[in-house]
Each structure stands twice: as C-alpha cells, then as structure tokens.
Image (cartoon, coloured by chain):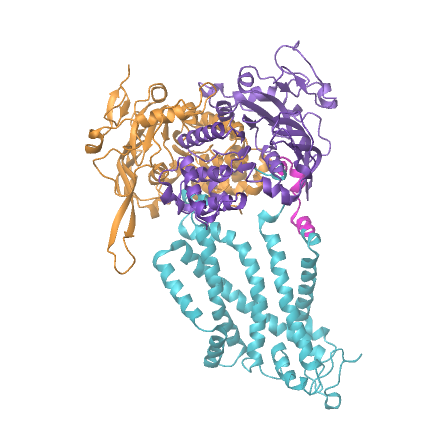
C-alpha cells in the first residue's frame, strides 16, 4: 500500500519519466553495457544471416584441393577445410540456415504453445486436462531422441528438422504460459474485464496474454539458443542438413575427425561461433524483458 | 560501542537524524533533522501519510535500512539501563544482531508475509528463543507454548504446528507479536500493525499490545496513518509530514489543541469524528517531490494557507508550547503569546 | 419517484463444494461437504438508495456481491434487477446481456484491479468499447477521448495522467481510475467492495467525498461493502450486518449506529477506534474461534460461542430476522429492544 518515495514523486512529476520509448531504450542500454554488447552481436549475426553471401570473402562451396587443410593465415582467417573451402566464408554463410531454423522452430512452438497454454490455464476443466496430458506425453520421451525419431520418420529435410524441433519445444511454452496464466487468472483486472463485457476469448488474448509476454521474452531468447544447438546437434549426427551445405553442426562433425591429427581450425571455429550465438541470445533475453515490461521502466 | 554515564532517562534518543536515498532518478531526502525520545514503558504513536518517512525511520532505528539508504547526520542513542548508552549508528552489524529481537523488536504490516511460509509458527518462535536465550532445547517448546497462550491464541498446542497460510490475519499478527516479545524487549516498534485487519481484530490486537506492554514494562512505538487508532492507544503522538517531525504532544493535547495546521487538518480529514459526509474536509494538493534539490525549509508550504515569506526562507523552528508539546512552525495555531518560544538555532 | 426496487434479492444462497477424506486414499470414504458462503440472504435496494453491507472477512460479503453482479452462479435464490430475474441469465452469457452495463463494481485492491499493461485511458474506455451503444462509439477516436477526459475530470484525475500505467500512479490515483471505469457507462447499481480500505486515511477522505458527489450527480444506487462501520456511516442510508453467510441485523444507518441490537453489531460499533473512548471499553466477543461455515448446523445460532450472551435456546433454534422497529430487523433471541 505504501509507495516508495521515488514512486510517489514520479506520480507527481511527469517530466521525470514521460520520455519517449527511444530515450528509455537508450537509457536502459546505457545502464547495461553487457546487454548492449549482446545487441550489437545480435545485429552482426542478423547481418550475416541476411547478407552472408555478399559479406563472405570466398564462395563457401568452391573447393580448391591445393590449399586444403591449411591453417589460419592472412588470406584465410579461419583456415581451409579438407576440400580447400574457406572456413570463414562457410561459417558466415551458415548463419542463415542455423538462425533460420531456430527462428522458425521457436516461432512455431511459441505460437502454438501460447494458445494451448492460455486455454489450459484460463478455461481449466477438460481443456486443461486434455492439453496437459498431451504435453506430459511429449515430455515423457527424451526430447532429442524424439526429435531424431520424428525426422527419421518424416524424412530427412530441413523442414522436418524445424517441425521436429518445434514439437519437442512445445511443452516448455505450454507449461510456462499455463502457469503464468494461472497466477493471473483471479486478478482483479480479469474480473473487471468480465464486468466490462469481455468474453473469455478476448480476456485470454487481450487482457491476460499481454501480461505474460514479458516473461515469455526471456524464455524465447533462451530458447533460441537451445534451438540453434538442437539444429546443429541433429545435423551433427547426420540428420537434416546434408553436405555440401554449410551449417555449423555439420562443420563441427566433419572437423571433429581432424582434431586428432592437429587441424583444429575446422571444428573449433564453427564451434566457437555456435557458442557465441547461444551466448548472445541468452544475454539478449534479459535486455529484451527490460524493454518490454512496463513495470521495469523506472 | 561507547559507554558513558548518562543522566538521561530516555530509553531511545533520536537526535537530528537526516536520511536520504540515492536512486537512479535523484536523491530522495526522506528524513530531515528528526529529534525525539522514547521513555521506558510509554506508548508513542508516529502518525503521517504514506511517504512521510515514518516506516523508514523505524527501519533506520532497527538498522535494517535498504542499501540505498544513507543516514547523513545525527545519532540514535540506545540506553536500556541508566549506566550504558550506545549509538546504534556506530554499532557493528554483529553487535546489532544481539540487540535485535532481544532488546529491540519490530512487528510489520502484513503479518502473513512477515512469517516464513514454509516453517511451522511454533518452530519460528522457538527459533527466536534459541537464538537469543540460553534455554536448553527441551525447554524451547514449552516456552513457545507459553508465549502463544500469552498472546491469547486459542488452542496453542494445535496452533504450534500450524503454518502461516492456515491462520487468519489476526492470528498471524498475534504470532508476530509472540515472536517479537519472546525475549522481553525493552522497545517494540509496531509498523502499521492493524492495516488490513478487520475492525474487531484491530481492537483485539491493539488491546493485546497494550496489555503486554504494561505487563512487561515495554516501550511501544506505534506507526500508523490512522489518527484515531493512535489517539486511542498512545500516550503521546508524533506527527510527521514529508520527512519532518512537525508536532509532538501528549494525545489529549494534540486532540484538543493541535498547533500545526497539518495536525488539525488530519483530524478533520478522518472519518471518525464526523457526523456527515459534508463535514469531511480532505487535504488537497499532493505531497512535495522529495527528490527536488531545492526543497523549501518547511515542506508543508505548498499545502498551507498561512505560509509567509519567513516560511520559505528560514529553517524550521522548534517551538515549545508546553514542556511536553512541541511544534515546528513559524505560525502555530492557537494563542500567540504562549510560554517558552524556543528556537532550535 | 419510482417506488419499485432496483434490486431485490430473495433467499440467495451460494454453497461451495468442499470434499474431504478422513484418512488417506484409498481407505477413507470421501464425504462431500459444502461451505455455506451465502446462506439465505434477502435484500432490497431502491433507485438512488445507498446500502451498506458490513461484516468481517470471511462472512461471505465478497461472495454475495459477486453473485449479485453475475460473476458467480448462485446455488439457489432469485435476483431481480429492474424487474427482470437476472439469475436466469447464465454467467457465461451475462457479459452480452443488456444488463451488464447497469451493474458495475469498484474493487478493493486498486493495484490488482488495473491491468498492468493498460494505460489509464485504455482501462477507463474498455467498458465503453465493449458495451457502449453504437451511437456512443460513432466517431470512435475523438468521442472516446472526449468521454475519457470527461470521466477523468469527474473523478478528479488530472487529464495528463490518462496516458500512464498503473505502476506510475499513486494509490489514490489508481482508485480514481477504477471509479472512472466503473461509472463510464452510467450504471444504475454500483457495487463498491471496500474501495477505501487500502488507502491512507487522508486519501480515503478524498475518495469518500468523490463517491458521495458522484452518487448525487449520476443518480446511482450504491451497495457499499466494508468492514469499517465508520466509512459506511458517512455514505449509506441503510445498513445490513452480515455474519457467516447470514444477515444478523438491518436498519437505517442512524439506528444501527446509535441503537445496535444484535450482540455482533454492538461489538462492531464499540470496536471502532475513536478519539474519545478509552481502550478496553468495548463490548467484546469472546476469544473463541468462529463457527465453521462448512455444513453449519441449522439449529445453532452462528454467533453462539463467541457471543457474550448465549443461552440454551441459541443452540436449539436458529434466530431469524424479526422486525423490532420500523425498518429495523434483528436476528437474535436476546436482541436489545430500543428504549
């Protein structure tokens, strides 16, 4: 009930906090240098994904047997692989595929999981029981094995990797959204929404879900990191993406055999970039939540 | 800890305390030049609106201020007996922990959240006993049960094993009182002890506090925004406004002849005295922003219709109306030829 | 003036099923019990009248108002609003019925009752957008803005605060937003669920004055819930005292305040802190726990055990509301009769 002194003061002083969204974003970024760094890195990755082919110094598919397996030099920053292809170029171009798979898979599971979770949480009763049992069934399987099984059953294509990743990712969103909705279901503003003439659908979509969104932002970002790893992992074991398409997982797989013989750069560089991408998304989640949740704007 | 012989009979002396909070959006001058004392065994009420600084004052006394809070001036002298005095601000955290719960206790506003939700309430009382007394383990439970019946909890044996969520608000508040009084402290600070409780429960809790205080000869500080509550249960009332202590008087005097405009306005804004809704006169205009770097010396000027130039420029005086009644105002209400005008400069 | 009541509640009950097992599954037999939250309430509110409903927490007043405002289905009983039996309209479709706009509510916890992601403007205009008649939504953006500003002025909310989020508003400002939202469609009946109990005493005064002024301006009826008799005294013409799901005393405000007859009402009145009374002078209820609302006996008076009075007849025959005076009713075998 009692307001902190700064809260009460801001209630009386509009000039202090009625800044534009841009000014606030700038302020938050300046407060968190690490988040800012993650943002920059994210933009770099997006650039690579969109313009990879133009940025890459060499054609990722051109092989040149004469310079195969050469270590990092001025001409080839990341060295060359067993077929003489420039590792740097391949790493840059691979960004599009890895990021693309992750984004689509996460978007799919977020969309479907949110709908299922909101219905289960708000409506309760039979919808909740049915949805929860389906999710429990999915979770009963070791998820990676399930993904492998799905890809093997549906066919070895990139689309199927996306679907498989989305399916095994579904429980996370459904459960998180369901529990967040459960927390807020009996809040005063939900009753007020009913008094204002809102039906259950509107309440779920316009009143409840927007409050769950900030929490989901963090989950989405963390999840992206996981999705990238998942896609790379499936490719690592030979499912989905096929050579010669450059993809971080495949590159690590192919380069693994060469580590023993001393050609470390084939596996290390793709692996390092993979790690950097996951790291970047993890940091991003926190920063995103600061921007999206109005309560953090003080 | 400095000890020296003191001829001061006060249990707790607050002298010229100023406190600020350093936040992202500026420094909040939460308290300025607060001075008062508490005598052993008396019940003092601290009354004020939200944001007046009363809770923050309590936290400062107990040494549990937020990290952002800094006491910039003054001292808090604690004199549990006539031979030792210590400045609580210079007491180390380790030494303070010996005091907290044992000699100085506090109960909080929302009793259910102040109790550990996953620990049985009886056990929580036993914890306090174990921490501050040298009772053998076998004695802890009987002592705790004894305390539970002292705070008039029906069926203490059964309630010992209850969790906070199983108890009503009133019962939780009594558990908190039992926790606070377990080691017989000399001073109890009650921060809004009855907010959120029903009117009948409020009365029972306050009566309980009053009875226990008399029995254990304990001084009580009751912090509340409810002037009627303070008037009924406290011997003396301190009125706070925007971080200033503006008036302090025995309850009867404050009720019959308030000298600060704010105190009199508080009475008229309270629903208890009034016959009809038309008698209710709210205090309009909001509290000043305490982050403002150039606050006027009297923070009530914007809400005061008696303010003059003096009020905008001169620092607040401390005018002694009677030996026990003080007011911080250049133009106090009532007769102007009062005895003993004493400025604090 | 139209004398037919705006709201007439007859024999309203609401029971919540509570199942319990004496011993762990699968050995114990599962017994179905019911929590009698509201147990046979009759009340009447006339157009323009302000009725106060007083009782401690757990007495069922929150459940009662949620049944009346059609957020919950009653177990039995009738709710007649504006000569229509609205209890026959199921809760799930009530949001679309024409009566939805006429019964609105102001909540106790102002922070909880505002959607943290809605600006004050959005919160206030939501009922208008959902329930306003087509002519009101015509020229939607300008009219909506104008209406929101009009409402803000009516409740004393500075217009520039309309673009703020709840966490940027003080307690009193949030209360005003809640009130503006509730009166946006000029409801005939406004139910107020302890609207000032979470506010500072000084802010309470402002909000109470506001509510009194609004009632006159908009000619609404109030059903004002509180556990604080003093607040109810200032705003209400008629008071109902509720205990454990039943009404124990009803009457005009002055009568209840000056001549309470039921022991529970007497305890409530004397528990109010005042500047003049001394502590410990109030007529006390005993420290015993209240009776359980789960499957209460139909023979025993609900207050028996806590009541300062209490004889054998109180255990054998439950008292019912009997008139002891014009408009004054008490449910007690030993009610104090007016001198």
Task: Name the residue rendered at 63%, 16% in the picture.
Answer: B323
Task: Name the residue rendered at 42%, 37% in the picture.
Answer: B170
The percent position of residue A230, horizontal first and vertical second, equals 55, 73
The percent position of residue A79, horizontal first and vertical second, equals 74, 81
| Residue C312 visible, this orientation | yes
- Please report the bounds of the magenta region as a residue range: A9-27
Image quadrant in which the C terminus of chain B is located: top right
Going by the image, does A255 lie left or right of B128?
right
The percent position of residue A21, horizontal first and vertical second, equals 65, 49
Residue sitting nearer the eye, C325 or A213: C325
Residue sitting nearer the eye, A173 or B267: B267
Residue sitting nearer the eye, B316 or B230: B230
Q: Is residue C262 magenta?
A: no
Q: Is residue A62 above or below residue C133?
A: below
| Residue C165 visible, this orientation | no
Image quadrant in which the N terminus of chain B is located: top right
Main SS of the magenta part reads helix
Q: Is residue C319 above or below residue C166?
A: above
* Chain coloured purple here: B
The percent position of residue C70, horizontal first and vertical second, equals 34, 41
Task: Name the residue rendered at 62%, 25% in the picture.
Answer: B9
* Chain coloured cyan here: A
Question: Quadrant of residue C68 in the image?
Answer: top left
* Chain coloured orange here: C
Q: Is residue A18 magenta?
A: yes
């Amino acid at each position: 009930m009692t307001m902190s002194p700064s809260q009460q003061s801001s209630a009386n002083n509009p000039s202090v906090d009625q800044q534009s969204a841009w000014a606030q974003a700038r302020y938050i970024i300046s407060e968190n240098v690490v988040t800012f760094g993650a943002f920059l890195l994210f933009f770099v990755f997006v650039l690579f994904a969109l313009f990879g082919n133009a940025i890459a110094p060499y054609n990722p598919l051109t092989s040149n047997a004469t310079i195969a397996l050469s270590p990092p030099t001025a001409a080839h920053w990341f060295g060359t692989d067993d077929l003489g292809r420039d590792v740097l170029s391949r790493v840059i171009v691979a960004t599009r595929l890895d990021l693309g798979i992750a984004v689509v898979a996460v978007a799919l599971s977020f969309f479907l999981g949110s709908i299922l979770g909101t219905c289960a949480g708000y409506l309760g009763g039979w919808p909740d029981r049915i949805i929860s049992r389906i999710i429990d069934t999915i979770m009963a399987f070791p998820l990676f094995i399930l993904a492998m099984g799905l890809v093997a059953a549906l066919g070895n294509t990139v689309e199927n990797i996306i679907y498989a990743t989305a399916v095994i990712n579904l429980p996370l969103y459904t459960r998180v959204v369901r529990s967040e909705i459960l927390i807020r279901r009996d809040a005063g503003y939900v009753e007020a929404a009913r008094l204002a003439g809102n039906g259950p659908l509107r309440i779920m979509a316009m009143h409840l879900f927007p409050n769950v969104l900030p929490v989901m932002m963090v989950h989405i970002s963390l999840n992206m990191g996981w999705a990238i790893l998942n896609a790379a992992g499936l490719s690592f074991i030979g499912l989905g993406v096929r050579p010669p398409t450059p993809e971080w997982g495949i590159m690590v797989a192919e380069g693994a055999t060469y580590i023993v013989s001393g050609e470390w750069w084939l596996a290390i560089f793709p692996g390092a970039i993979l790690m950097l991408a996951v790291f970047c998304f993890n940091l991003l989640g926190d920063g995103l939540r600061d921007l999206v949740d109005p309560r953090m704007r003080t | 800890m400095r000890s020296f012989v003191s001829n001061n009979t006060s249990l707790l002396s607050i002298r010229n305390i100023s406190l600020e909070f350093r936040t992202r959006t500026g420094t909040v001058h939460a308290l300025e030049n607060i001075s008062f004392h508490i005598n052993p065994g008396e019940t003092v009420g601290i009354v004020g609106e939200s944001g007046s600084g009363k809770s923050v004052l309590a936290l400062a006394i107990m040494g549990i201020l937020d990290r952002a809070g800094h006491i910039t001036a003054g001292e808090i002298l604690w004199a549990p007996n006539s031979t030792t005095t210590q400045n609580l601000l210079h007491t180390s955290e380790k030494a303070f922990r010996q005091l907290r719960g044992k000699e100085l206790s506090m109960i909080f506003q929302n009793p259910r959240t102040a109790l550990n939700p996953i620990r049985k309430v009886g056990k929580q009382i036993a914890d306090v006993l174990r921490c501050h007394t040298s009772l053998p383990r076998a004695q802890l439970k009987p002592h705790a049960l004894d305390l539970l019946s002292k705070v008039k909890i029906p069926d203490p044996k059964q309630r010992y094993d209850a969790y906070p969520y199983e108890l009503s608000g009133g019962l939780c508040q009594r558990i908190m009182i039992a926790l606070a009084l377990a080691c017989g402290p000399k001073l109890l600070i009650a921060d809004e002890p009855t907010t959120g409780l029903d009117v009948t429960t409020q009365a029972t809790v306050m009566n309980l506090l009053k009875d226990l205080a008399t029995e254990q000869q304990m001084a009580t500080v009751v912090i509340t925004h409810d002037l009627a509550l303070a008037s009924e249960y406290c011997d003396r009332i301190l009125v706070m406004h925007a971080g200033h202590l503006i008036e302090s008087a025995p309850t009867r005097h404050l009720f019959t002849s308030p000298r600060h405009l704010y105190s009199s306005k508080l009475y008229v804004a309270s629903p208890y005295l009034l016959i009809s809704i038309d008698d209710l006169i709210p205090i309009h205009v909001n509290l000043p922003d305490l982050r403002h770097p150039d606050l006027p010396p009297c923070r009530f000027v914007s809400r005061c219709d008696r303010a003059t130039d003096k009020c905008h420029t001169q620092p607040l005086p401390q005018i002694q109306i009677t030996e026990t009644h003080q007011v911080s105002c250049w133009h106090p209400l009532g007769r102007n030829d009062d005895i003993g005008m004493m400025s604090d400069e | 003036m139209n004398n037919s009541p705006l709201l007439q509640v007859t024999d309203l009950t609401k029971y919540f099923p509570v199942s319990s097992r004496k011993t762990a599954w699968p050995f114990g037999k599962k017994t179905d019990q019911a929590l009698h939250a509201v147990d046979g309430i009759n009340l009447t509110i006339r157009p323009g009248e302000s009725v106060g409903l007083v009782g401690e927490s757990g007495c069922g007043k929150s459940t009662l108002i949620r049944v009346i405002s059609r957020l919950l289905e009653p177990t039995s009983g009738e709710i007649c609003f504006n000569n229509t039996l609205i209890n026959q309209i199921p809760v799930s479709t009530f949001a679309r019925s024409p009566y939805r706009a006429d019964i609105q509510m102001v909540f106790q916890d102002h922070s909880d009752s505002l959607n943290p992601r809605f600006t004050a403007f959005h919160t206030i205009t939501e009922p208008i957008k959902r329930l306003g008649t087509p002519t009101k939504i015509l020229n939607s953006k300008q009219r909506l803005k104008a209406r929101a500003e009009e409402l803000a002025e009516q409740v004393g909310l500075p217009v520039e605060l309309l673009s703020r989020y709840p966490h940027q508003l003080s307690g009193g400002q949030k209360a005003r937003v809640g009130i503006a939202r509730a009166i946006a469609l000029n409801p005939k009946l406004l139910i107020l669920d302890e609207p000032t109990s979470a506010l500072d005493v000084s802010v309470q005064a402002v909000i109470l004055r506001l509510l009194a002024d609004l009632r006159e301006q908009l000619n609404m009826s109030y059903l004002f819930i509180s556990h604080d008799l003093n607040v109810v005294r200032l705003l209400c013409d008629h008071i109902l005292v509720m205990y454990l799901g039943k009404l124990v005393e009803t009457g005009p405000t002055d009568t209840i305040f000056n001549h309470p007859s039921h022991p529970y009402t007497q305890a409530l009145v004397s528990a109010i802190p005042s500047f003049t009374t001394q502590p410990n002078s109030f007529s006390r209820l005993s420290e015993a726990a209240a009776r359980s609302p789960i499957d209460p006996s139909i023979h025993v008076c609900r207050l028996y055990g806590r009541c300062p009075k209490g004889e054998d007849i109180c255990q054998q025959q439950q008292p019912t509301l009997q008139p002891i005076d014009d408009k004054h009713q008490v449910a007690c075998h030993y009610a104090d009769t007016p001198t």
